[in-house]
Amino acid sequence: LKGVSEEARELVAQLVVAPFPDEVKRPVSGKTNPCDDFYEFSCGTWTEENRHKIPKYKSSVGLAWNQASHRIRDAMEKLFETDTGPVGTYYKSCMDLAHVNEQGAEPLKPWLAVVDGITDREGLVRAVAVFNKNNLDNLFSWYVGRDPTQDDTRAFFLTQGSVTLPDKAYYTEDSAEMREHRATLEERVGHLFKLIGRDKPEEEAKLVMKLETAIADALDERVVARGDHGTVVTWEEVGQKTPEWMWKEWLEELAACSDAPDGGASMCPEGGHPAVLQAGKEGGKPLLMENVAFFQKLDKILKEHSLDSIKALMRWKVVHSAGPSLSEEFLDSLVQLQKDIYGIQQKSPRPRKCYYSTLETTAWPAAKLYADQVFHRPNVGAAGAMLEEIRTQFSAALKEEEWMAESDRAAAETKLREMFFQVGVPTDKDGKEDWPEQTTALDGLLGHELYPNEMVGSRLSIQMSLRDLTQKPNRRKWGGSTPTAVNAFYGATNNGLWIPAGILQSPFFDIKNEEARNYGCIGAVLGHEMSHGFDDNGRQYNAKGELQDWWSPATVKGFKQGSTCIANLFDTYSIKGRHVQGKLTLGEDIADSGGIKFAYQAFEASGKRTDADRRLFFTAFAQTWCSVQKTKNAVAEMLSDVHAPNKFRVLGALSQFQPFADAFKCPTGSPMSPKDKCSLW
């Protein structure tokens, strides 16, 4: 399309997309040469129409993802309004805004009283553990997960803490942009402290900022943290790294049953969790520490910051966490913080806010409602068949990878063959529906008070996590996702792939759509998740999901050559002067590369294809990622997200894939078909 007038270019573009369904034609821009920028070609018209239509209560809008999410919400809100179980109870408690406003800061009082009651270091340690049992972490964090080296064992993990702003750069970077963010956060902390009646809110806000800055500075860089699988330690070694913390007392309180500060159901089993006390000891479950350097720095933080400073931070954690479930004055104050960080201008409409809050707190009961009353179940079989087609193509590619040693190819094929799929809803190994106990665990436990309801849900998740330490891992467990998610997931320690019911709908997948659309949308998503099993992180786990050095040095060298090329490519992309961190996004970029290749090969192998079919396939893939977002949100994601910005995911994947260049007749040397391409799979 180079060398022709704009009118002629648009005419040619119209001819190119003429065979496409109207839904795919509409977003396309004829002003852009597809060989120059395929994202703008595929999404340009939609982008121009929606660039200034982002709702004031959102930071971004996505063409495909928002369509699917809105369709679920439209159906589910009606069910929420009439449900008589925990879903309906929670939703109604949220929608009763008059009562929530009347309560004001009252729901916070029992939690703030815990902080006020701290008078010494031991009291601090035990209070932190009380908050941990209610899913409120301070200073550091912890979790129960699979032992990465033993597929039949769980372990207790210690991990670094978190901060309010999206990334440590917001605290440590000396730029006008970041100084403004820090000033806004300090001002909002002070304002919210006024709302809870603190005598010296501005002084306490300064204490919070100073301590959060120290914690942020101590955090591992995201690239380092992403590759940290945990180090086996004993409690003696933990104590040597952070001697200022009373680990024995903290663990005792965490393992013990105690009344919830707000008087709600504790859900702690009689006798507590003695297995937690044995973790890291002979005969007990393994104890692993992630972010070892952080815990060494935490000791210095504990020495240099006063008890009052830590208590101020704990109050902030309570208020910031609870704020979305409190009265409008709290919501309005938090919106000002979100405006500064993400560009959000106003609080979400109440029904929307309550829908998503309900979906979070009563996730599994809501998922069962969706599966039983909304989900189109015939899509499960079709998606499962597509997965098998993509696995066949992946397997064929493994047989021919020249950079892999023969024995490593065989082991990789075994891993791919043993990778299990869960499509739509939870099932056991025989394909029978197998809903987790969380589906009914909240029955009868919720009432009319919104924030107490939220905390019941939080305690349930923590108590189940503590109990799970003694349970043999279930590889098929969904973890933090449910069937309502518009997403898909791969678990490296499970060697399993989950395709929730929420994504098995138009525009991602519809049995009425052209096959090219289905393969380009959901097919590429499925291939992406499958490829995660062999990305820079997934490749370190064997067929059973165990961390193992199972590739030969020669194979690792070949992999790194290909993956380094991909990381270097993404390093060249930037927004507002900030570059993508190719090493941070590498796993997702590798998965995009594999996903598009194996979905395309499955598409070609499943029927006779025309050039128009191929162009529709690639356009459907690109339109999966059409999106617009506020500039502040783009910066936050650039610094904190393991995914590259959507535009670069399209450009990075397709510019390195020769069949794309062939389909659109892109000459070698054009932006979408460089002479030297990255090749891994």
Image (tube, rainbow, N blue to C red):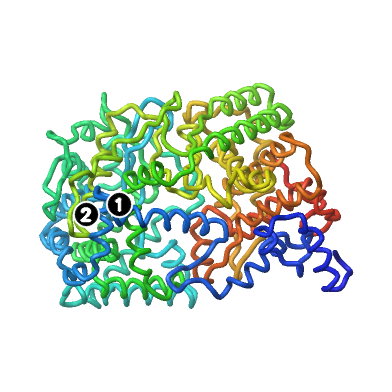
Q: Residue at x 17, y 74 (%)?
A: 198
Q: Is residue 417 left or right of residue 45?
A: left
Q: Residue at x 64, y 47 (%)?
A: 513
> Gap in Å between the C-alphas at discs 2 and 1?
8 Å
Residue 460: x and y in percent read 24, 44
Residue 576 in view in this figure: yes
Residue 554: x and y in percent read 67, 30
Residue 628: x and y in percent read 57, 67
Q: Quadrant of residue 651?
A: bottom right
Q: Nearer the viewer, residue 432 or 227?
A: 432
Q: Is residue 499 left or right of residue 525?
A: left
Q: Residues within 10 Å of mark 1 (few under 14, many from 20)?
A: many
Residue 362: x and y in percent read 30, 49
Q: Quadrant of residue 139?
A: bottom left
- Residue beneath label 1, please? 361
Q: Nearer the viewer, residue 588 or 65?
A: 65
Q: Earlier in the sequence, mark 2 or mark 1?
A: 1
| Label 2 SS | helix
Q: Amino acid at mark 1?
A: Thr
